[in-house]
Image: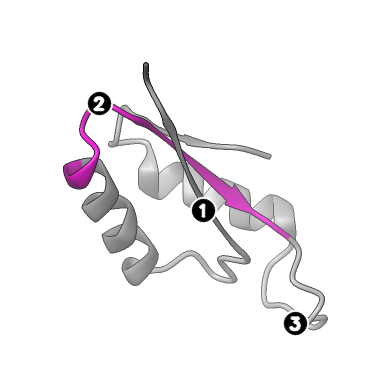
Amino acid sequence: MSKIILYGGSFDPFHKAHEEVVKFLTKKFPTEEIWVLPSYNWMKPSGLFSIEERIFMAKEVLKKYPSVKVLD
């Protein structure tokens, strides 16, 4: 049975360290699907980017990883 790995965060902005986590997960779990879940963080009310912009950034950076899906 296949599993889904969830990786959530505010990703404001999505940066290299976030990608490194995804890269690690794809190597550690090569047959699993990884779902990246950008979310609103109430502790950062003056965030740098809107949720739509953060989703877009994550999708652009992670499109090279076939087992990764960025959910909105």
Of label 1 and label 2, which has the lower sequence position? 2
Indicate the colouring scheme.
Answer: one colour
- Say which mark, if any, is on residue 44: 3
Of the image marks 1 and 3, the number of the one nearer the N terminus:
3
Q: Residue 17 or 33: which is nearer the viewer?
A: 33
Single out the mark in the foreground, 1 or 3. Answer: 3
Mark on residue 71? none
Which residue is the site of mark 2? 31
How far from the left and from the top, in percent, is residue 31? 25, 26
**Residue type for callout 2:** Thr
Q: Residue at x 61, y 37 (%)?
A: 71
Q: Is disc 3 placed on a helix, strand or loop?
A: loop
Is residue 28 shown above or below 13? above
Q: In this view, does 34 lie to the left or right of 23?
A: right
Q: What residue type is labelled 1?
A: Met
Label 3 or label 2, whichever comes before in sequence order: 2
Magenta span:
27-39
Label 1–label 3 contact, CB within 8 A: no
Q: Quadrant of the N terminus?
A: top left
What kind of element bears circle 1? helix
Tell me the residue that label 1 is attached to: 57
Q: Which residue shows up at 33% across the image and 29% down it? A: 32
Number of other residues with Cα within 10 Å of mark 1, as a class: few under 14, some 14 to 19, many 20 or more? some
Relative placement, left or right, of 23 versus 50 is: left
Nearest the eye: 31 or 64: 31
Circle 2 sits in a helix, a strand or a loop, which is it? Answer: loop
Q: In terms of depth relative to the viewer, which is nearer, 53 or 10?
A: 10
Residue extending farthest top: 1
